[in-house]
Amino acid sequence: MSVDKLQYGSSLYRQGLPQELIDSIVDQIPVDEQHTLRECTLVANSFYTRAHRRLFSTVILKSSRYTHHRQAFDPYGRFFQLVSRYPHDAALVTDLRLYDHSIPNSESWLASDEIIVPSILRLLPRLSSLSIHAFDTSLSRATLAAIRRIISTTALSSIHFHRVIFRHEPLSFGSLFASSTSLKNVSIHDGQIALGSTFGGAVTPNSLDIKMMPEAASGFVDCLLSSQCPFDLKALNSLTLSTTWMKNATIFNPLLGLVRDTLSELIIHTSNTSARPLQLGRIPRVKIYLTVHSEWPSMFFALAAMLAASESALEDVAISITGSGALVDVQHACVLDDVLRKVKRNVFIYVILSNPIHGNNKGVLENVEKTRRALKCLLPLTDATGTLKVDAGRMPIEL
């Protein structure tokens, strides 16, 4: 935010701008734009409270190469000092994201730290979301104990583990969820979980997000289906599954068989490397993110195989297809027609052609238009609302 914008904000304040509008302006600033939010606190008192709260709402701690007076900047230590001295600011933190980093004589900070991270977690009374990104390592016992405490005693509603290894020991993965009343969203990406015996089943999540290597995923699914399951899945509303190779998607079929009659939304990230059916049961909403890796099987045969096993008419289907123009072959698009005609409400198809024709802008546009024309036949002729979008580039997709 420039000096001119600060002066403009100050002039708005002098003109008596309603506080609700000021709050709305501050809320539009992304939480990762720390510099802008800090400058907002300097505009006027009417900006300070909202900007200060938003500045502390999401805290991201990761290693930094920044040095001051030849000393490395320690974000973990600095943040610990801040929340220790200013409990009011600590109470503003609702989303904490911890990133592992290497330290001398150890491969992992999170695996060796027994003091700082546990102390930080104890000082955040209103934490609602916790995300931990490790280096394929386990967490220290003190950190695991602190996580178990906040799950059982605070209003934590969402937890995400990325590349965290849970070993078979007293503080196992299942023991973290021995008691909880508020945790609703659980996400596990690229980790490993050793099955333990201390599983309470006290957590009833609304959403579960699983992304693991095939062997780890198979073991975790077996756990979820057993009496040792750490979760009560009877109220599961949304399930997200990620697997690089579609042939491994069937690993999750037993889990889908368990929740398919109560699940309201399935989100799956996969590829077209095979054509395997998924046990969709009566799941009304399905979102598929498909990356095209090869010419065969056709991406449309792969999609048809996934959707054909539905036991009732789908209400909403969203399909995102990403691949190079050479691999996105639309000649077999008609195989999806019968499946999509049965959709009751909405069909959304989004195709992103990544580098379809090297450096040829005219060819890119022609390829996009060709794909768009060919896919129009997929939009059902029923009462469902059909939406088709074809783009060139590598942009993030939100269905």
Image (cartoon, rainbow, N blue to C red):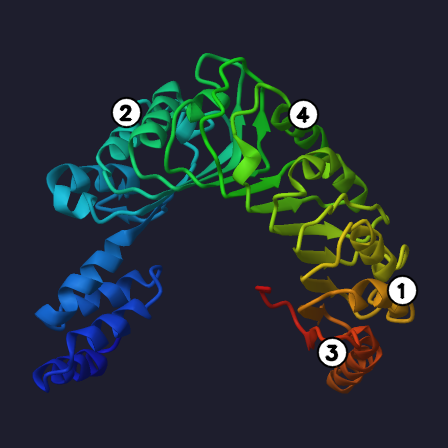
In this rendering, position of residue 183 left or right of residue 384: left
User: Residue 111 falls in which quadrant of the image?
Assistant: top left
The mark tally for this picture is 4
Q: Name the residue nearer the viewer: 159 or 144.
A: 159
Element at label 4: helix
Amino acid marked by disc 4: Asp
For the residue pair 47 and 359, the one nearer the viewer reads as 47
Asked whether residue 283 appears in the rendered view, the answer is yes
Question: Closer to the observer: label 2 or label 3?
Answer: 2
Residue 74 visible (yes or no): no
Q: Report which residue position mark 1 lands on.
A: 335
What is the crowding at mark 4: few (fewer than 14 residues within 10 Å), some, or many (at least 20)? some
Q: Residues within 10 Å of mark 2 (few under 14, many from 20)?
A: few
Instruction: Classify 74 as above or below 226.
Output: below
Image quadrant for the N terminus? bottom left
SS for dot 2: loop
Q: Which mark is residue 52?
A: none
Q: Which residue is mark 2?
A: 115
Q: Earlier in the sequence, mark 2 or mark 1?
A: 2
Of the residues under marks 2 and 4, which one precedes in the sequence?
A: 2
Q: Disc 4 vs disc 1: Cβ atoms closer than 8 Å?
A: no
Lateral position of residue 246 relative to residue 46, left or right: right
Residue under pointer 4: 222
Q: Mark 3: which amino acid?
A: Gly
Q: Amino acid at mark 1?
A: Val
Please tell me whether mark 1 sits on a helix, a strand or a loop. helix
Mark 3 or 1, closer to the camera: 1
Gap between marks 2 and 3 measured at Cα: 54 Å
- Residue 359: give its label: 3
In percent of width and height, residue 122 lies at: 24, 31
Quadrant for residue 25, please give it. bottom left
Residue 100 rendering spot, x and y as whole percentages: 43, 36
